[in-house]
């Protein structure tokens, strides 16, 4: 089964989901106070738009990087990929809810933060499931020694731990979830770069 | 006529339709009761989101599998494909209506369930029409013996029977439609796997 | 300049526009009368959804057919293509307006019908402009004799006459616009088939 | 890293963003005055739709032209491209806000115009950043002499100056922003043509 159309379909879903994020940016229109105040009041919407945009963007980049290492895909991978997309598509909803409730304080802000963290957690876990399946089923172009499976998969799965922490932090102060997500996006940029600089999955290390 | 651009267009429609499903997940915002209650109250929206996501996902996978078996496409197939997409695109609407009315009880819940089943039925029938046309017009890479046409087409058409049953069950209890749809998604996963394990359309049997 | 990415971008726009048509199908939700009545009352939305879906589908098929005949594209063609897409993207708006006002009677129904016809007219004219530019600038794989230019371009442009008639008919009875659009979709199916059966642009006739 | 999937993803985002522009065109429906008055009253929505459609279209064309000159892409370029898309995706929001407030006069119209100019400015700057990175990191198929870097990059960056002017003009009269954007679209058409006619980046000049 060729991977081209899976990538094309996934790219389409990523592209629509990342664009739908902007639907959260609407202002109420004339007759609802000065526009400048409305915009200023919407800073949670803008902040969460930027963070979520780069979250989806990073996942797309990683998706891209991962699929390039596949020699082929199987049916199980298609479903793991669908599971990943299920959470990606839910991000605009989680983002809108977070933006709406970020400043409401109390229980609601915490619930919104936790919901956002859960969706990211689901996305990270699905990504790890997809990667683990690919490693174990020999879908990668290079064969990874069985003794390295655990380490390689754990490194991919590190994001899921971060989002669990973010989930916990949501109950301390909801905006922490946004901050952790933003930092995670930055982490993934450098983490991936370090993979490519050091002995990598793609080239295979000497050990 | 090459099949590449038909696939690209169809992938785009599938990707947009599957992503628009998430538009149904919005909460009403601050001032409408505790967020946790709103989310809990929305379980029909979440349940139908997951089921519809995988329904569209399965159809996409089957679409993918089917088109890979085409040697070429003709104009009639383009229109059969458009008919299929007409129903795929209507799924977010049917899903939103089902989610809104699932718990309303009485006549409305039954109508919403029946509407959802009808859209799936239309999708399944269009898929069967497309497949039957491909079989009879020799668009497949392998030529299927004329005596096998009926059996092969009937197997593709089995989904339409299931959705007719779902339509009837909607008048018993609306949530049954969602349950049947979810089980059908699971069925298609295994049904397709069994095709690929046994003598398949793609490899051709010994007879 | 290769035509692949123009097709990919156009396919994306067609796919999103055709899918956004379904946003017009929403019902008002519980507390707005029996669902069956709401659905029945929405027949203009369903009818215009089906007609517009096939209108966009037909234009996509023709776009597909036309681009397959291009040996290359130039910058002017990109802008003619953008103009075409400008009208394609406006179809969901025109469709929603037509559906909302189709049964309102009086001036409003006529205006909505005329608006719908104008958007289709703009689409048809843009398509003709694009085709005419391709013929005159030698972008087609086959060179069309200069004495056939007018006939070939006129045949492409016949749709624009139909939509002018539809525009006029809108002032008689708004639903006539939908009927004419539906019939035009059917016409294009057969018209194109006849091109492919007889001496065609693609194969070149003996005369 | 191959550029194909970056283009596919970007095309998807461009296609969705350009199509979402049309969501701003909705009328309020029956019971809100004569439809013809509603449509006439919405001329700012139509005007800003057309201008923004061509703004996104032009950026897509330039994106297309630029990527064709890349021999390969690196990770940094992916993120610069994401930054560009972040602003592209925000255009429908800025367009809707501009259309809503264009005629409101006073402070609000100026703010809406300034917001629109800022989003375009962000887009132009991201485009320049992406181009500058490509020039300096040798991602282009032709190597540009180091002494020409500044001139080549400045030419790309000219748009950003125009949008700064538009930003300032917003405080004089908000519609000027739309007019400047429309003229800029026209400018880019001819500017690019002149590149292709004269000694160009792609073919390389005699020096």
Image (cartoon, coloured by chain):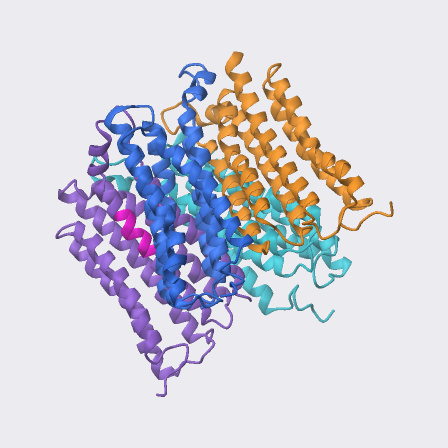
Chain colours: A purple, B cyan, C orange, D blue
Task: Quarter of the image for the C terminus of chain C: give it.
Answer: top right
Q: Position of residue D69 (x, y in %)?
A: 49, 61
Q: Position of residue B73 (x, y in %)?
A: 68, 53
The residue segment tinted magenta is A48-56
Q: Nearer the viewer, residue D188 or A138?
A: D188
The quadrant holding residue A29 is top left
Q: Nearer the viewer, residue A159 or C97?
A: C97
The vertical placement of C178 against C53, above or below, is: above
The vertical placement of D200 against A28, above or below, is: below
Residue ranking furthest to the bottom: A207
Residue ranking furthest to the front: D207
Q: Nearer the viewer, residue C126 or B28?
A: C126
Magenta stretch: includes residue B40: no
Q: Main secondary structure of the magenta part?
A: helix
Please name the residue shown 48% across and 38% down the image.
Answer: C20
The quadrant holding residue D81 is bottom left
Is B117 on the left or on the right of B154, as rendered? left
Q: Nearer the viewer, residue C46 or D71?
A: D71
């Amino acid at each position: 089964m060729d991977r081209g159309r899976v990538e094309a379909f996934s790219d389409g879903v990523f592209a629509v989901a990342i664009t739908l994020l902007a639907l959260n940016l609407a202002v109420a229109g004339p007759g609802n106070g000065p526009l400048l105040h409305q915009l200023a009041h919407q800073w949670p919407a803008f902040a969460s738009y930027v963070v979520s945009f780069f979250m989806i963007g990073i996942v797309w980049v990683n998706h891209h990087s991962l699929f390039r290492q596949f020699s082929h895909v199987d049916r199980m991978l298609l479903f793991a990929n669908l599971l990943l997309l299920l959470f990606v598509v839910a991000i605009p909803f989680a983002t809108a809810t977070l933006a709406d409730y970020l400043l409401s304080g109390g229980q609601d802000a915490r619930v919104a933060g936790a919901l956002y963290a859960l969706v990211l957690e689901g996305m990270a876990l699905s990504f790890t499931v997809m990667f683990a399946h690919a490693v174990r089923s020999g879908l990668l172009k290079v064969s990874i020694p069985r003794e390295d499976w655990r380490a390689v998969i754990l490194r991919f799965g590190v994001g899921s731990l971060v989002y669990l922490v973010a989930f916990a932090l949501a109950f301390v102060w909801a905006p922490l979830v946004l901050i952790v997500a933003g930092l995670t996006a930055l982490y993934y940029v450098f983490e991936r770069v370090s993979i490519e600089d050091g002995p990598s999955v793609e080239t295979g290390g000497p050990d």
